[in-house]
Image: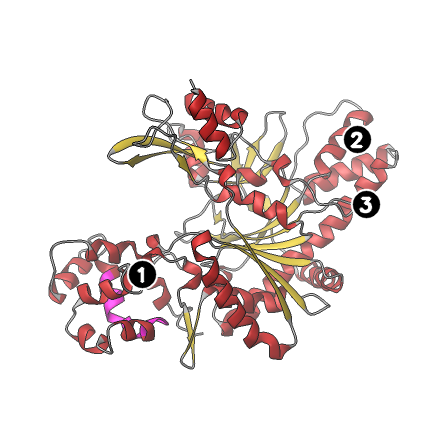
Amino acid sequence: MLEQHDLEAIEKHGISEEDAAYQLDLFRNPPPYAALDRACLPNDGIRVLDDKEKSDAILHFNYAAAGNRFQKFVPASGAASRMFQSLLWFLHRDETETREEIEQGAASRKEHYPNLLAFMNGIAEFAFAGDLDKALAGELPRLADQFDYKTILGALLNPDALNYAELPKGVIPFHRYDGEARTPIEEHMQEALVHANNADNTCHIHFTVSPAHLPLFEEITERAQNRFRSQHVTFETSFSVQKPETDTIAVDAKNALFRNEDGTPLFRPGGHGALIENLNDMHGDLVFIKNIDNVSPLQLTPQYIEWKRFLAGHLVKLQERVFHYVTQLSGGIENTFLLDEALEFMKSDLSVVPPALENDGAKRRFLLEKLQRPIRVCGMVRSEGNPGGGPFWVTESDGSQSIQIVETAQIDPDDDAQQAVLASATHFNPVDLVCGVRDYLGHPFQLRNYIDPNAVFISRKSKDGRELKALERPGLWNGAMANWNTVFVEVPAETFSPVKKVVDLLSDVHQNQP
C-alpha cells in the first residue's frame, strides 16, 4: 500500500501513480516467460543476403543518403567499472602477490588472475599507457618491470588519480594511431563519417550520457569535429540523459516498497530499455544503433561500413514495400490478390506468421495493424561463446508468431523444452541495427506505443546490507522494440569487436593488427 508521502515522492520523481502501481504489481505477479517456438536459423528467421540483395541494398542506401535521412544513436552512459572488474578485485585486496603467484593463478585459470597477468604483460600496448605513465610521474616502465601492480592499478582506477573505473567507457582511450590516442566516441564519429554521412555533408550522431559526464563528452566531440573539419563534413552532435521518470521503484523480499534510511522510496535506473524515450525524442528517420564499446580501429572500418550499408539499404527496400501496401490498403483497395500478396510479404520478408484470418476484412485489419509499425533490421553473428541475447521465433498471445531478440533471463530456467530451444541457438545479437522510425506519411512513430510492457527483468540486489528486488524496463532491443517489424540478417563475426574487459584491447583487432 502506498502512503500519501510515497505518492508525493513518486510524483516528484516524475513517475505516475498508475505506473508505480503497475510496477508493484509486476513484482507480486511476475509476467510469464517468453514462449519460444524455435531458434532462428539461416533462411528460417535469419536472412543471408546474396550478391543481388547486397547490390540492391547499396542502391537503396545511396538513395536514402541522398535524401539526408540517416542518423546514429549510441547508448553511452554506462560506467566502465565492469570493464575493470578483475583489476578492481586485485586493487581492493589486502594481499599483494608476486609475479610468480599471479602466473600460477593464471595457469590454473583462477578467476581474475589471467586478466591481471595479461594486463601487466601488455601494459605498454594500451592506448592509455601515456596517460597512465604521466599519472605515475614517468615511473610506469620501472613499476611494470617490478610487477608493482598495486601502484599501477591505484593510478589507473582510484578516484584521486585517473579514476577510469568511474568514467564512461566512451571517454577511455581505446586505440592509438602514430602516438595519438582515440576514444570510442571519436571512433563512432569516424564510422558515422562514412555510413551516416548524408548528401548535404552533415552527419547526425546522438549519444546518451550521464549528466555528470556531459562536459567531457562535449569536449571530446568538439575535438573530433575540429579534426574532421578538413573532410568538409559538419557533425550535428547531440546528447541526452536518461529521464528520471524512467527510473523504477524497488521492493523488499516481501514485495513491500523498499525504503532508504530516511524512509523515502528507493528509485533505481530502469536499464537501457528506458532509452526508448531518448530515441523517441530524436524524431529521426533512419537511425543506426550500436553500443559504445563495439568499435573498430580505422583500418577495419571499410568492412564495418560495407555491412552498415547492406543493413540500411535492405531496410529501405523493405520499407518501400511496406509503405506501398499501407498506402493501397489505407486508400480502400483490398482485392484478394493484394491482400494475399501483402500477407506473403509479411511471412517471407518480415517473418510474421499470421493467425487464422476468416475473410478479406480480417486480413485487411491485420495487415494495417501489423504493417503500420516501426521497422528494424538487426545484424546477427554466429555464436562463438559471446554474450548477448539471441534471435528466436516466439509465439504471441493471438496465436501468431514473430521473431524476437530474447535474453536468457526471459526464458524459463525450469522448462526443459524451452532450455533445449535456447541451447539450439546458432547466432547472437551484437547490437548492430538500423531502425526506420517514421510512417508512410513521414510522421514519427510514437515508439512507446510499441513496447511490450511485460518484458521486464526482475533481479535481486542489496543496499545497505538489505536485500531488495529491482525492476528493469524492457530492454531497448528486446521488449522495448518487441512490437516493431523485425528482420534479422547474418553479418560476419569480423563486424563485432566489443570491449567488455580491459584486456580485450590487447587483441589483434584493437591493436590495429590486420
Which residue position holds label 3?
Answer: 324
| Rendering quarter of residue 196 | bottom right
| Gap between marks 2 and 1 measured at Cα | 58 Å
Q: Residue at x 46, y 39 (%)?
A: 270
Q: Residue furthest bottom?
A: 178
Magenta segment main secondary structure: helix
Percent across and percent down for residue 314 are 68, 55
The image's mark for residue 163 is 1
198 lies left or right of 120: right
> Which part of the image, by quadrant, shows the N terminus?
top left
Q: Residue at x 49, y 23 (%)?
A: 21
Chain-order first, disc 3 or disc 1: 1
Q: Is residue 253 magenta?
A: no
Observer-side mark, 2 or 1, equals 1
Percent across and percent down for residue 436 are 67, 49
| Gap between marks 3 and 1 measured at Cα | 54 Å
Which residue position holds label 2?
Answer: 364
- Mark 1 element type: loop
Percent across and percent down for residue 508 are 39, 70
Q: Residue at x 23, y 68 (%)?
A: 120
